[in-house]
């Protein structure tokens, strides 16, 4: 029996799985909302590969063939997984819900199974940005 393949082969060398937030406030609920929010800052899209809604729904965002856009020094070799949120009253703040954390853990487990060579890090660990993302350390596998 063939093992089920979750992801097709991608055309770039991966080293990191970066966990972070979308850095958006409480009005943002969906991937479409995230993309609208980041366009105000001149970006085409969020730059994350997978985004998790507040209710734990997992949304694909950008193709795994494309580099991430969440950690300047590591984008080319990273997959980015972000929870929607990360801002409260205009300031960076850890806002992940339990449903988001549970979904993120499931996504990390699946990605680590599919790409065992990747190291799991928070954006804060790699760039010093994204205050509050150190709370995601519990998801490191």
Image: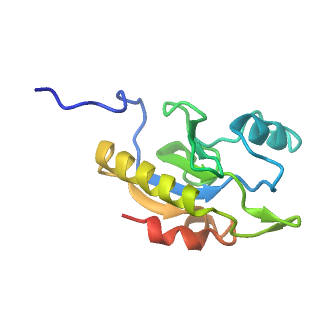
Protein image colouring? rainbow
Quadrant where the N terminus lies?
Answer: top left
Q: Residue at x 53, y 60 (%)?
A: 101
Q: Is 53 placed left or right of 58 in the picture?
A: right
Question: How many numbered callouts?
Answer: 0
Say left or right for 77 vs 38.
left
Question: Residue at 44% of width from left, 48% of height from top?
Answer: 107
Determine the residue positioned at 70% across, 52% down: 22
Expressed as whole percent of the image width and height from the top left, the position of residue 102 reads 48, 58
Residue 41 in which image quadrant = top right
The image quadrant of residue 7 is top left
79, above or below 89, in the image: above
Place of residue 32 in the rendered image (x, y in percent of width and height, measured from the top left): 74, 34
Q: Residue 29's x, y, as percent?
A: 74, 45
Q: Residue at x 35, y 28 (%)?
A: 9
In front of the other: 132 or 74:
132
x and y percentages locating residue 137 in the rendered image: 49, 71
Q: Nearer the viewer, residue 103 or 20?
A: 103
Depicted 30 relative to depicted 98: above or below:
above
Give the residue furthest to the left.
Answer: 1
| 119 left or right, relative to 5 | right
The vertical placement of 102 against 53, above or below, is below
Where residue 12 sits, quadrant-wise, is: top left
The C terminus lies in quadrant: bottom left
């Amino acid at each position: 029996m063939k093992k089920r393949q979750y992801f097709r082969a991608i055309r770039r060398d991966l080293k990191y799985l970066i966990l972070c937030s979308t850095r958006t406030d409480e009005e943002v609920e969906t991937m479409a909302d995230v993309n609208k929010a980041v366009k105000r800052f001149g970006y085409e899209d969020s730059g994350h590969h997978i985004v998790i809604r507040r209710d734990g729904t997992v949304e694909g965002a950008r193709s795994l063939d494309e580099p991430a856009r969440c950690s300047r020094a590591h984008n080319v070799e990273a997959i980015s997984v972000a929870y929607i949120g990360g801002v409260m009253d205009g300031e960076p703040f850890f806002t992940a819900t339990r449903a988001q954390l549970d979904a993120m853990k499931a996504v990390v487990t699946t990605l680590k199974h599919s790409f065992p060579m990747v190291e799991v890090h928070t954006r804060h660990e790699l760039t010093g940005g994204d205050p509050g993302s150190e709370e995601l350390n519990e998801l490191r596998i």
